[in-house]
Amino acid sequence: MMAVAATQATSETLLAAVLSSLNDDKAEDIVQIDLRGKTAIGDYMVICSGRSSRQVAAISEKLVERLKAQFGRTARIEGKNTGDWVLIDTGDVIVHVFRPEVRDFYQLEKMWQPTAASN
């Protein structure tokens, strides 16, 4: 009988680690969106901003390093070279790190968050 590895993470555990990493690296305007039951791409989406291309790249690199160290999980990362919009796909949690102007342009939150009922 094989023991389940201690690094086995639920999507909630992974989300908590992602949020902790983003907070540690001073990511701004962190938004988490529950995707369960809405799409098969993942359980959660996290969107945040960095003040500069350099900070966006640094936030992303640190997040990938921490997830690998904590869970032995290799995340796919795209866009790190430009530092405008970095996508980190952990499988269960998808993370978008933007420069503020790029985030304003794409407005991903509006696409994924439930709309408030208008009165």
Image (cartoon, rainbow, N blue to C red):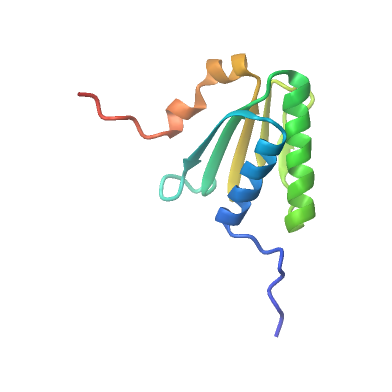
Question: What residue sits 73% from the left and 33% below the top?
Answer: 59
Which residue is nearer to you in this view: 3 or 17? 17
| Image coords of residue 26 (percent x, y) | 68, 30
In the image, residue 91 sits, relative to residue 5, either above or below, namely: above
Q: Quadrant of the C terminus?
A: top left
Taking the view exactly as shown, the residue that stands out farthest to the bottom is 1
Question: What residue sits 74% from the left and 22% below the top?
Answer: 83
Residue 105, quarter of picture: top right
Residue 7, quarter of picture: bottom right
Question: What residue sits 65% from the left and 44% below the top?
Answer: 20
In the image, residue 39 sits, relative to residue 54, either above or below, namely: below
Whether residue 92 appears in this view of the structure is yes
| Image coords of residue 97 (percent x, y) | 65, 29
| Image coords of residue 81 (percent x, y) | 79, 25
Which residue is nearer to you in this view: 88 or 59? 59
The image shows a total of numbered marks equal to 0
Which residue is nearer to you in this view: 112 or 19? 19
In the image, residue 15 sits, relative to residue 61, either above or below, namely: below
